[in-house]
Image (cartoon, coloured by chain):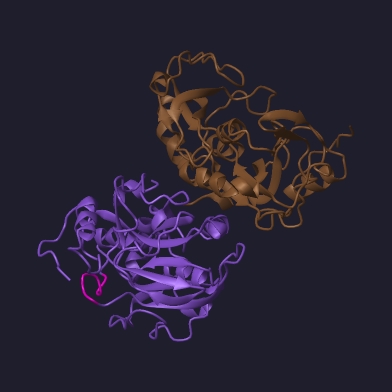
Chain colours: A purple, B brown
Amino acid sequence: MTTSTQVPQTGAEVRSLIRAGKYRQPTSGAAPDFVQANVAILPREVAFEFLLFCQRNPKPCPVVEVLEPGEVEAKISAPGSDLRTDVPLYRVYKNGEFVDEPDTLDEWWRDDLVTFLLGCSFSFEHALIRNGIDLPYYGTDRNVPMFTTSVETVPAGPFSGPLVVSQRWIPEGKVVRAVQATSRFPSVHGAPVHVGNGASLGIEDQYKPDFGDPWIPEDPTLVPVYWACGVTPQAVAMASKSELMITHSPGHMFVTDLKDEELAVI
Amino acid sequence: MTTSTQVPQTGAEVRSLIRAGKYRQPTSGAAPDFVQANVAILPREVAFEFLLFCQRNPKPCPVVEVLEPGEVEAKISAPGSDLRTDVPLYRVYKNGEFVDEPDTLDEWWRDDLVTFLLGCSFSFEHALIRNGIDLPYYGTDRNVPMFTTSVETVPAGPFSGPLVVSQRWIPEGKVVRAVQATSRFPSVHGAPVHVGNGASLGIEDQYKPDFGDPWIPEDPTLVPVYWACGVTPQAVAMASKSELMITHSPGHMFVTDLKDEELAVI
């Protein structure tokens, strides 16, 4: 594995390094102003129902772009890209079972595959930070705490399952600001789904996440705030045991040419 | 045709009158607080591409709800409804040609049909009126002026064509408020696509609309403001010459149980 020593500054730069085999690490921190996306690739046979699932559950499944069957270039969010080569690391699942973690999709690509690019939390975390809200794991190798809730998503076709949320402890005087700042970005999860008591979401121990690292706040005035998480559609698609499903490997996202601010609705 | 003398006040009331054959008129003014939807019904074969078209063009094609193939109940926006009977008047097109205008879909329903409910401008017009912006055609039998523009929608599969916009003349001191008030409602067309000079959209004569009635403002300080229009997806779907397509008859909308305010994003 060769790794570039300089941090690439644009989406196009990141993708071209990846395509040249010079970038195989997680993309957090790369091209900091650019929107990164979760990747889910499914056969056309279930693409309508998966897009419908996203439409019915926009907070966990905010759509950045969907490619047409067989198409490999994200023409809207990343012209010139190739989804078969421009993600640092992929995961391949057959009937819901993990079978491969390749560098490229040369071995796996088919003309009936539909690529979904879904918003990820990096963009709205920038918005929180710009508003003076500290995220202690940000820029470290720790991850945000994530919880599987007792809240069911709205099913569509074979796709159903619980909502997964991420948790961030926000100073009580900044909760309103955190809601406002993230509401501007519905295509990267948007406003929180819940403020305060995690038990209302069926979370038994707010210090023991199901995924990611625990976040044990030292300041007792911090309030836990929960946002819908991009793990939701991946878990739901995997549970549907689609004959084939390809995703990015965790943290190894697709970097677009869109800038955070372009996603703001207001 | 029997027409109820009293104006029904809820979506459920309107739908039950329609289903009983007692309401065959346009739905403007019926159940005034409830969201009304444009209806487009297409075969499953093209449903993924049409939903993708809506996702790529959210301003002209804001999705309120999409039903699964063969499903006739809008479970999310109108539980208990039946899309085969609960629209006052339908239009049926075969290969893009108008062939029938039935009261119910008993003769036309098929198990592979997918129903799209798309936002209509009634809800955001309420928002303008609540903000003190006068719409002279509102509550009359005149219609908003609509123009086919030179702006192309983002195509998806067989669906492509020009953006159609509606025009409203807004007092110059209220233009900012009009943008703010409608931005809150992206699922009913949302913010304007353009403020001012219609020539920028390829509109040759701003007093000669392609559809609806002209609006010739008497006050020279009024500014023309343009919103994406629900005629866009209907025109695009018709131009695709889908083997079968069913819509509501103009003005004869599907009335949901959602209230305008439930659609607000902020």
Q: Residue furthest left?
A: A5
Against A98, is A191 above or below? above
**x, y percentage for residue A215?**
32, 81
Using the image as rendered, state which of residue A212 and residue B2 is in the foreground.
A212
Residue at image position (51%, 16%) is B217
Number of numbered discs: 0
**x, y percentage for residue A39?**
39, 61
Against A218, is B106 above or below? above
Main SS class of the magenta portion in the image: loop
Locate the N terminus of chain B and report the quarter of the image it occupies: top right
Using the image as rendered, state which of residue A225 and residue A89 is in the foreground.
A89
Relative placement, left or right, of B13 versus B243 is: right
Which contiguous range is marked in magenta? A135-141
Relative placement, left or right, of B103 versus B138 is: right
**x, y percentage for residue A151?**
55, 73
Q: Residue furthest right?
A: B2
Residue at image position (42%, 24%) is B201
Against A264, is B146 above or below? above
Relative placement, left or right, of A214 versus B238 is: left
Asked if residue B162 lies in the magenta stretch, the reply is: no
Residue at image position (37%, 71%) is A91
Q: Quadrant of residue A254?
A: bottom left
Would residue A165 be visible to someone looking at this image? yes
Against B210, is A77 above or below? below
Would residue B33 be visible to someone looking at this image? no
**x, y percentage for residue A77?**
34, 48
